[in-house]
Image (spheres, helix red, strand yellow):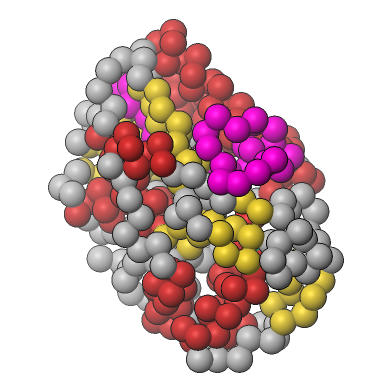
Amino acid sequence: MKVLVVGGAGYIGSVTVEQLLEHDHEVIVLDNLCRGHKEAVSIKAKFVQGDMGNVDDLNAIFGAEKIDAVMHFGALSLVGQSVEQPALYFKNNVTNGITLLDTMLAHGVKKFVFSSTAAVYGEPHSSPITEDFPLVPTSPYGDSKLAFEKILKWYANAYGLMYAALRYFNVAGATETAGEEHDPETHLIPIVLQVARGERSHVTIFGDDYPTADGTGIRDYIHVKDLADAHLRAVEALKHPGQSSVYNLGSGTGFSVNQIIEAALKVTGKPIPTKIGPRRAGDPSTLVASSQKIQEELGWKPQFGSLDTIIGDAWNWHQKNPKGYHREQAHV
Ligand code: UDP
């Protein structure tokens, strides 16, 4: 297949690009580099710097290449920022996404894989979360993703779009060549590893009074390689006009903030000082996925689900790339 990967210079996009190439797919990456890193994109992929909200950029690609499918990783994803700047999130994640959909359909491209999120569930009533749980996002970010899922449903109904929406839980880990680098960094595992590397003085634990065994928040961490594998399975399963599927993606096990810090201590052998802070606004106490649906329907199974592997791979990447992607050598 020839796959257009929008946002392929970002963390999850770049790892998926690697796997697509390993499976002999042809890859074109479109990224505006507002968050991504060009060095994260394999040199075996064709890279286009441009914007999914710009019809000219899209027409140039769809006009020149016979694209079979689109994977869309090109959204903004900071919950706190979305609360402060909802216009930015709805413009980028919804309006620009519609431009992408309309342009691909105008060129006869009908296969689409969408990066959705556990944030569509808001504060769930119980765990593990299945795909039929109530959809009540608590942030503009979650609402923008849910809005786009709804658009996909109606586009499939009217225009024969075939899509899979993948609701990610907490993604972490790295490959040999691609890892997680955000600025600002807000995610727990990279922050914990920055402390282990001496780049931060301590980790602030956002609340130790949650109704969990040790009082800290519980999340379901999935290895980015397993997540990328789900994208390949999802795109390969798109065969019938109007076909649609929605899948949760997690490892099915919850780990508390304290458990993550303990595991990182073990993996890195470095001190990780902590301080207890207040809860972060909008953080649910527990988010654990049931990924049974994608396991049954697409035969997906987490291969790298152990916490030691997830943290160990992230640690190796950060050790090898202490300055992240701000480095001389290109990704191969
Ligand atoms: N967390 C924390 N300190 C930090 C960052 C995160 O205690 O500096 C907690 C957060 O409250 C949540 C978990 O770690 O319970 C995972 O947060 P992250 O931001 O990595 O992902 P999220 O679940 O918000 O998507």
Asked if 98 appears above or below 8 in the picture, the reply is above
Q: Which is more toward the observer, 169 or 315?
A: 169
- Residue at far left of view: 24
Residue drawn at the location 29% of the way across and 27% of the way down:
238
The stretch drawn in magenta includes residue 134:
yes
Which residue occupies 44% across, 44% down? 291
- Nearer to the camera, 64 or 81: 81
Q: Nearer the viewer, residue 258 or 70?
A: 258
Magenta stretch in the rendered image: 109-138
**Is residue 63 visible from the viewing direction of this image?**
no
Residue 245 placement (x, y as % from top left): 41, 27
Q: Residue at x 65, y 30 (%)?
A: 134
| Name of the residue lying farthest toward the right | 278
Image location (x, y in percent) of residue 213: 69, 66
Please tell me which residue lies in front, 167 or 308.
Answer: 308
Q: Quadrant of ligand 1?
A: bottom right
Residue 27 shown in magenta? no
Measured as percent of width and height from the top left, residue 13 is found at 40, 50
